[in-house]
Amino acid sequence: MEPQQQATQAAQPGWITLDAILAAAWRQKWLVAACVAVFAGLAAAAAFTMTPMYRAQVVVIPVKADDGRAALSSMVGQLGGLASLAGVSLGGGGNKDEYIRFLRSSDFTARFIEDEKLLPVLFAKRWDAERGQWNVEDPADVPTVADGVRLFDAGMRNVSEEKVSGIVTLTLVWSDRELVAQWANLLIERANRDLRKRAIAEAQASTDYLNAELAKTSVLELRQAIYRLLENQIKTVMLANVRDQYAFRVIDPASAPDPDDTVRPKRLAMILLGMVFGGGVALMIVLWGLRRQRLQRVEGAGAA
Protein backbone atom coordinates (compact mmCIF):
# COMPACT_ATOMS: atom_id res chain seq x y z
CA MET A 1 0.00 0.00 0.00
CA GLU A 2 2.79 2.35 0.78
CA PRO A 3 4.32 2.29 -2.72
CA GLN A 4 0.84 2.74 -4.17
CA GLN A 5 0.22 5.75 -1.92
CA GLN A 6 3.53 7.27 -2.99
CA ALA A 7 2.67 6.71 -6.62
CA THR A 8 -0.75 8.29 -6.08
CA GLN A 9 0.79 11.34 -4.41
CA ALA A 10 3.41 11.66 -7.16
CA ALA A 11 0.64 11.59 -9.74
CA GLN A 12 -1.22 14.48 -8.09
CA PRO A 13 -0.28 17.57 -10.12
CA GLY A 14 -1.05 20.04 -7.31
CA TRP A 15 1.12 18.34 -4.67
CA ILE A 16 4.15 20.62 -4.11
CA THR A 17 6.11 20.40 -0.89
CA LEU A 18 7.71 23.28 0.98
CA ASP A 19 11.14 21.76 0.44
CA ALA A 20 10.52 21.75 -3.29
CA ILE A 21 9.47 25.41 -3.21
CA LEU A 22 12.55 26.46 -1.22
CA ALA A 23 14.83 24.46 -3.46
CA ALA A 24 13.30 25.98 -6.59
CA ALA A 25 13.55 29.47 -5.13
CA TRP A 26 17.22 28.91 -4.35
CA ARG A 27 17.86 27.67 -7.86
CA GLN A 28 16.20 30.82 -9.20
CA LYS A 29 17.65 33.16 -6.59
CA TRP A 30 18.61 35.71 -9.23
CA LEU A 31 15.00 35.86 -10.37
CA VAL A 32 13.85 36.33 -6.77
CA ALA A 33 16.47 39.02 -6.17
CA ALA A 34 15.51 40.78 -9.40
CA CYS A 35 11.81 40.83 -8.47
CA VAL A 36 12.55 42.16 -5.00
CA ALA A 37 14.90 44.82 -6.39
CA VAL A 38 12.49 45.92 -9.13
CA PHE A 39 9.48 46.33 -6.85
CA ALA A 40 11.56 47.96 -4.12
CA GLY A 41 12.84 50.41 -6.73
CA LEU A 42 9.32 51.16 -7.95
CA ALA A 43 8.15 51.73 -4.37
CA ALA A 44 11.13 53.99 -3.69
CA ALA A 45 10.46 55.98 -6.85
CA ALA A 46 6.83 56.43 -5.85
CA ALA A 47 7.79 57.35 -2.28
CA PHE A 48 10.26 60.02 -3.36
CA THR A 49 8.02 61.53 -6.04
CA MET A 50 4.92 61.81 -3.85
CA THR A 51 4.32 65.19 -2.26
CA PRO A 52 5.35 64.96 1.41
CA MET A 53 2.67 65.89 3.93
CA TYR A 54 3.46 67.42 7.31
CA ARG A 55 1.54 67.56 10.57
CA ALA A 56 1.31 70.51 12.96
CA GLN A 57 -0.45 70.38 16.31
CA VAL A 58 -1.63 72.99 18.79
CA VAL A 59 -2.42 71.76 22.29
CA VAL A 60 -4.95 73.92 24.15
CA ILE A 61 -7.32 73.71 27.06
CA PRO A 62 -10.77 75.31 26.88
CA VAL A 63 -11.20 78.14 29.36
CA LYS A 64 -14.02 77.54 31.80
CA ALA A 65 -16.61 80.28 32.13
CA ASP A 66 -15.99 82.19 35.35
CA ASP A 67 -18.81 84.65 35.20
CA GLY A 68 -20.58 84.14 38.50
CA ARG A 69 -23.61 82.43 37.01
CA ALA A 70 -23.76 79.81 39.74
CA ALA A 71 -24.32 82.55 42.29
CA LEU A 72 -27.51 83.46 40.46
CA SER A 73 -29.02 79.98 40.48
CA SER A 74 -31.27 80.83 43.46
CA MET A 75 -33.13 83.33 41.26
CA VAL A 76 -34.08 80.84 38.53
CA GLY A 77 -37.71 80.66 39.62
CA GLN A 78 -38.07 84.40 39.85
CA LEU A 79 -36.04 85.56 36.84
CA GLY A 80 -35.97 82.57 34.52
CA GLY A 81 -38.17 84.21 31.87
CA LEU A 82 -36.45 87.57 32.10
CA ALA A 83 -32.98 86.04 31.92
CA SER A 84 -33.98 83.94 28.95
CA LEU A 85 -35.27 86.98 27.08
CA ALA A 86 -32.08 88.85 27.91
CA GLY A 87 -29.89 86.04 26.67
CA VAL A 88 -28.48 85.35 30.13
CA SER A 89 -27.96 81.76 31.26
CA LEU A 90 -28.32 81.12 34.95
CA GLY A 91 -26.67 77.73 34.85
CA GLY A 92 -23.11 77.19 36.01
CA GLY A 93 -20.27 75.45 34.20
CA GLY A 94 -18.15 76.28 31.24
CA ASN A 95 -18.64 76.48 27.49
CA LYS A 96 -16.11 73.81 26.52
CA ASP A 97 -18.39 71.87 24.18
CA GLU A 98 -19.57 75.05 22.50
CA TYR A 99 -15.99 76.20 21.93
CA ILE A 100 -14.94 72.87 20.42
CA ARG A 101 -17.98 72.79 18.13
CA PHE A 102 -17.16 76.31 17.01
CA LEU A 103 -13.58 75.29 16.16
CA ARG A 104 -14.95 72.46 14.02
CA SER A 105 -17.77 74.46 12.45
CA SER A 106 -18.06 74.94 8.71
CA ASP A 107 -18.90 78.63 9.09
CA PHE A 108 -15.72 79.35 11.05
CA THR A 109 -13.65 77.33 8.56
CA ALA A 110 -15.21 79.13 5.59
CA ARG A 111 -14.44 82.55 7.04
CA PHE A 112 -10.88 81.46 7.78
CA ILE A 113 -10.39 80.31 4.17
CA GLU A 114 -11.89 83.51 2.79
CA ASP A 115 -10.02 85.91 5.05
CA GLU A 116 -6.66 84.20 4.53
CA LYS A 117 -7.31 83.75 0.78
CA LEU A 118 -6.39 80.08 0.94
CA LEU A 119 -8.19 78.74 -2.13
CA PRO A 120 -5.21 79.28 -4.52
CA VAL A 121 -3.00 77.51 -1.97
CA LEU A 122 -5.38 74.65 -1.23
CA PHE A 123 -5.99 74.04 -4.94
CA ALA A 124 -2.61 75.08 -6.30
CA LYS A 125 -2.76 72.63 -9.23
CA ARG A 126 -5.68 74.59 -10.69
CA TRP A 127 -4.23 78.03 -9.98
CA ASP A 128 -2.12 79.94 -12.48
CA ALA A 129 0.08 82.16 -10.31
CA GLU A 130 1.53 84.07 -13.26
CA ARG A 131 -1.84 85.15 -14.59
CA GLY A 132 -3.49 85.28 -11.20
CA GLN A 133 -6.48 83.22 -12.26
CA TRP A 134 -7.82 79.70 -12.26
CA ASN A 135 -6.43 77.44 -14.96
CA VAL A 136 -9.67 75.62 -15.79
CA GLU A 137 -11.71 75.34 -18.95
CA ASP A 138 -15.08 74.87 -17.30
CA PRO A 139 -16.10 77.62 -14.85
CA ALA A 140 -17.82 74.91 -12.81
CA ASP A 141 -14.35 73.52 -12.00
CA VAL A 142 -13.30 76.69 -10.18
CA PRO A 143 -12.86 75.74 -6.51
CA THR A 144 -15.28 77.33 -4.07
CA VAL A 145 -15.08 78.03 -0.37
CA ALA A 146 -17.35 75.03 0.16
CA ASP A 147 -14.72 72.89 -1.60
CA GLY A 148 -12.11 74.25 0.79
CA VAL A 149 -14.28 73.44 3.80
CA ARG A 150 -14.76 69.90 2.54
CA LEU A 151 -10.99 69.57 2.16
CA PHE A 152 -10.51 70.66 5.77
CA ASP A 153 -13.16 68.20 6.95
CA ALA A 154 -11.82 65.34 4.82
CA GLY A 155 -8.75 64.81 6.96
CA MET A 156 -6.76 68.01 6.68
CA ARG A 157 -7.99 69.20 10.09
CA ASN A 158 -8.78 67.20 13.19
CA VAL A 159 -9.90 68.36 16.63
CA SER A 160 -9.59 65.76 19.37
CA GLU A 161 -10.32 65.97 23.08
CA GLU A 162 -8.99 64.00 26.01
CA LYS A 163 -12.08 63.34 28.10
CA VAL A 164 -10.21 62.94 31.39
CA SER A 165 -7.94 65.97 31.24
CA GLY A 166 -10.09 68.12 28.94
CA ILE A 167 -7.05 68.93 26.78
CA VAL A 168 -7.89 69.65 23.14
CA THR A 169 -5.49 69.07 20.26
CA LEU A 170 -5.94 70.78 16.90
CA THR A 171 -4.10 68.93 14.13
CA LEU A 172 -3.51 70.18 10.60
CA VAL A 173 -1.90 68.24 7.75
CA TRP A 174 -0.50 70.00 4.68
CA SER A 175 2.37 69.85 2.20
CA ASP A 176 4.10 73.05 3.38
CA ARG A 177 5.61 72.53 6.84
CA GLU A 178 5.91 76.25 7.57
CA LEU A 179 2.40 77.08 6.44
CA VAL A 180 0.77 74.19 8.29
CA ALA A 181 2.20 75.39 11.62
CA GLN A 182 1.21 78.98 10.85
CA TRP A 183 -2.35 77.98 9.98
CA ALA A 184 -2.74 75.83 13.09
CA ASN A 185 -1.72 78.67 15.40
CA LEU A 186 -3.82 81.15 13.46
CA LEU A 187 -6.94 78.97 13.71
CA ILE A 188 -6.74 79.04 17.51
CA GLU A 189 -6.00 82.76 17.52
CA ARG A 190 -8.97 83.52 15.28
CA ALA A 191 -11.27 81.22 17.26
CA ASN A 192 -10.36 83.11 20.43
CA ARG A 193 -10.91 86.44 18.70
CA ASP A 194 -14.26 85.48 17.16
CA LEU A 195 -15.60 83.91 20.35
CA ARG A 196 -14.49 86.92 22.35
CA LYS A 197 -16.27 89.29 19.95
CA ARG A 198 -19.40 87.18 20.06
CA ALA A 199 -19.39 87.10 23.87
CA ILE A 200 -19.00 90.87 24.05
CA ALA A 201 -21.81 91.43 21.53
CA GLU A 202 -24.15 89.06 23.36
CA ALA A 203 -23.33 90.61 26.73
CA GLN A 204 -23.90 94.09 25.35
CA ALA A 205 -27.26 93.09 23.89
CA SER A 206 -28.23 91.55 27.23
CA THR A 207 -27.13 94.70 29.04
CA ASP A 208 -29.25 96.89 26.79
CA TYR A 209 -32.27 94.67 27.38
CA LEU A 210 -31.77 94.61 31.15
CA ASN A 211 -31.36 98.38 31.30
CA ALA A 212 -34.63 98.74 29.43
CA GLU A 213 -36.37 96.39 31.87
CA LEU A 214 -34.80 98.22 34.79
CA ALA A 215 -36.36 101.46 33.62
CA LYS A 216 -39.80 99.83 33.52
CA THR A 217 -39.97 98.49 37.06
CA SER A 218 -40.04 100.10 40.48
CA VAL A 219 -40.18 96.85 42.48
CA LEU A 220 -37.12 96.88 44.71
CA GLU A 221 -36.52 93.12 44.72
CA LEU A 222 -36.77 92.91 40.95
CA ARG A 223 -34.49 95.91 40.48
CA GLN A 224 -31.88 94.31 42.75
CA ALA A 225 -32.08 91.08 40.77
CA ILE A 226 -31.65 92.96 37.49
CA TYR A 227 -28.61 94.72 38.96
CA ARG A 228 -27.13 91.32 39.71
CA LEU A 229 -27.69 90.24 36.13
CA LEU A 230 -26.18 93.47 34.86
CA GLU A 231 -23.16 92.93 37.06
CA ASN A 232 -22.77 89.49 35.51
CA GLN A 233 -22.82 90.91 31.98
CA ILE A 234 -20.37 93.68 32.85
CA LYS A 235 -18.00 91.07 34.22
CA THR A 236 -18.33 89.05 31.01
CA VAL A 237 -17.42 92.09 28.89
CA MET A 238 -14.51 92.97 31.18
CA LEU A 239 -13.02 89.46 31.02
CA ALA A 240 -13.47 89.27 27.27
CA ASN A 241 -11.72 92.58 26.74
CA VAL A 242 -8.68 91.77 28.87
CA ARG A 243 -8.23 88.09 27.98
CA ASP A 244 -6.74 87.42 24.54
CA GLN A 245 -6.99 83.65 24.98
CA TYR A 246 -10.67 83.94 25.70
CA ALA A 247 -11.88 80.44 24.84
CA PHE A 248 -8.70 78.38 24.38
CA ARG A 249 -5.58 78.69 26.51
CA VAL A 250 -2.58 77.55 24.47
CA ILE A 251 -0.42 75.00 26.24
CA ASP A 252 1.83 74.02 23.35
CA PRO A 253 1.76 76.11 20.15
CA ALA A 254 2.41 74.55 16.77
CA SER A 255 5.92 74.64 15.34
CA ALA A 256 7.13 73.73 11.87
CA PRO A 257 8.03 70.02 11.70
CA ASP A 258 11.44 68.90 10.49
CA PRO A 259 11.81 68.31 6.74
CA ASP A 260 12.05 64.54 7.23
CA ASP A 261 9.19 64.39 9.76
CA THR A 262 6.45 63.59 7.28
CA VAL A 263 3.03 62.12 7.88
CA ARG A 264 3.09 60.55 4.45
CA PRO A 265 4.59 59.05 2.48
CA LYS A 266 6.31 56.70 4.91
CA ARG A 267 9.20 56.02 2.58
CA LEU A 268 10.89 53.23 4.49
CA ALA A 269 7.59 51.44 5.00
CA MET A 270 6.75 51.78 1.30
CA ILE A 271 10.14 50.36 0.26
CA LEU A 272 9.78 47.44 2.66
CA LEU A 273 6.29 46.74 1.33
CA GLY A 274 7.69 46.87 -2.19
CA MET A 275 10.31 44.28 -1.25
CA VAL A 276 7.68 42.03 0.30
CA PHE A 277 5.45 42.38 -2.75
CA GLY A 278 8.39 41.63 -5.04
CA GLY A 279 9.18 38.52 -3.02
CA GLY A 280 5.56 37.45 -3.33
CA VAL A 281 5.62 37.90 -7.10
CA ALA A 282 8.84 35.89 -7.31
CA LEU A 283 7.27 33.13 -5.21
CA MET A 284 4.26 33.00 -7.53
CA ILE A 285 6.60 32.65 -10.52
CA VAL A 286 8.49 29.84 -8.79
CA LEU A 287 5.25 28.04 -7.92
CA TRP A 288 3.98 28.43 -11.45
CA GLY A 289 7.23 26.89 -12.76
CA LEU A 290 7.03 23.97 -10.35
CA ARG A 291 3.42 23.28 -11.23
CA ARG A 292 4.24 23.40 -14.92
CA GLN A 293 7.09 20.93 -14.46
CA ARG A 294 4.86 18.61 -12.44
CA LEU A 295 2.15 18.69 -15.11
CA GLN A 296 4.71 17.94 -17.79
CA ARG A 297 6.00 14.94 -15.83
CA VAL A 298 2.49 13.65 -15.29
CA GLU A 299 1.65 14.04 -18.97
CA GLY A 300 4.88 12.27 -19.91
CA ALA A 301 4.17 9.39 -17.54
CA GLY A 302 0.65 9.06 -18.95
CA ALA A 303 1.88 8.99 -22.53
CA ALA A 304 4.40 6.28 -21.65
Image (spheres, rainbow, N blue to C red):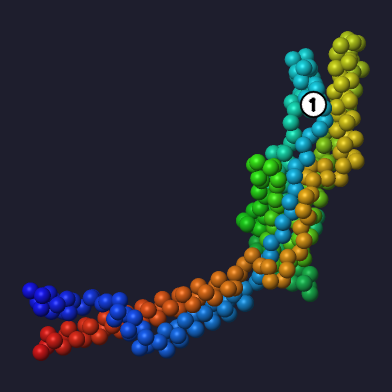
Q: Secondary structure at mark 1?
A: loop
The residue depicted at 72 percent of the width and 60 percent of the height is 56
| Residue 77 spot, x, y in % from top left | 74, 15
Q: Is residue 70 left or right of residue 12?
A: right
Q: Is residue 150 or residue 246 the one in the foreground?
A: 246
Amino acid type at mark 1: Arg
Residue 125 lies in quadrant: bottom right
Q: Answer whether residue 106 is visible to the viewer in this image.
A: no
Q: Is residue 190 or residue 22 the one in the foreground?
A: 22
Quarter of the figure with the C terminus: bottom left
| Residue 175 spot, x, y in % from top left | 69, 67
Above or below: residue 216 compared with residue 120: above
Above or below: residue 50 compared with residue 54: below
Above or below: residue 20 compared with residue 167: below
| Residue 237 spot, x, y in % from top left | 88, 34
Residue 238 lies in quadrant: top right
Q: Is residue 148 left or right of residue 5?
A: right
Residue corresponding to mark 1: 69
The residue depicted at 87 percent of the width and 36 percent of the height is 239
Q: Is residue 24 left or right of residue 152?
A: left
Residue 166 lies in quadrant: top right
The residue depicted at 30 percent of the width and 76 percent of the height is 18
| Residue 180 spot, x, y in % from top left | 74, 62
Q: Answer whether residue 263 is visible to the viewer in this image.
A: yes
